[in-house]
Image (tube, rainbow, N blue to C red):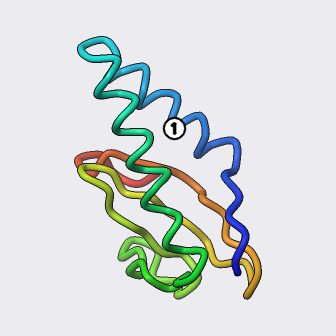
Amino acid sequence: MVQIIWIKRAIQDLNDIAEYIAKDSPRYADLTIEKIFDKTQILKEYPEMGRVVPEINDNKIRELISGRYRIIYEIKNSELIEILTVNHSSKLLN
């Protein structure tokens, strides 16, 4: 089974998302973050589940969609995936 690591940037993205949503609804902020975390769990068994990120066009850099958010990850090897960033779909990938 593949190990999933969240790099600092991705964790900061989640904190920023939660903080922004919590201004209107702390409960919805919690649910959104939980949903994003849950979505990544499928990668443990199906690491290539996500599509290749079109802006990057590298088979190892992929994305899952959770609601309005893009979860960008890199397949490092057969045992490790790094979650790189989580972006709102309306924003450009930077």
Q: Residue drawn at (23%, 47%), measured in percent from left and top?
A: 90
> Residue 62 or 54: which is nearer the viewer?
62
Density class for disc 1 (Cα within 10 Å; few <14, some 14-19, many ≥20) is some
Q: Residue drawn at (24%, 14%), measured in percent from left and top?
A: 24
Q: Is residue 27 left or right of residue 11?
A: left
Q: Is residue 92 left or right of residue 44?
A: left
- Quarter of the image for residue 83 reads bottom right
The number of numbered discs placed on residues in the rendered structure image is 1
Q: Looking at the picture, does residue 9 appear above or below residue 39? A: above
Q: Looking at the picture, does residue 68 appear above or below residue 54? A: above
On the image, numbered disc 1 is attached to which residue? 13
Percent across and percent down for residue 27 are: 32, 22
Q: Is residue 78 left or right of residue 29?
A: right
| Secondary structure under the numbered disc 1 in the rendered image | helix
Percent across and percent down for residue 42 are: 49, 72
Kind of residue at disc 1: Asp
Q: Looking at the picture, does residue 90 appear above or below residue 42? A: above
> Residue 55 or 28: which is nearer the viewer?
28
- Quarter of the image for residue 76 reads bottom right
Percent across and percent down for residue 1 are: 70, 81
Q: Looking at the picture, does residue 71 appear above or below residue 2? A: above
Q: Residue drawn at (70%, 42%), measured in percent from left and top?
A: 8
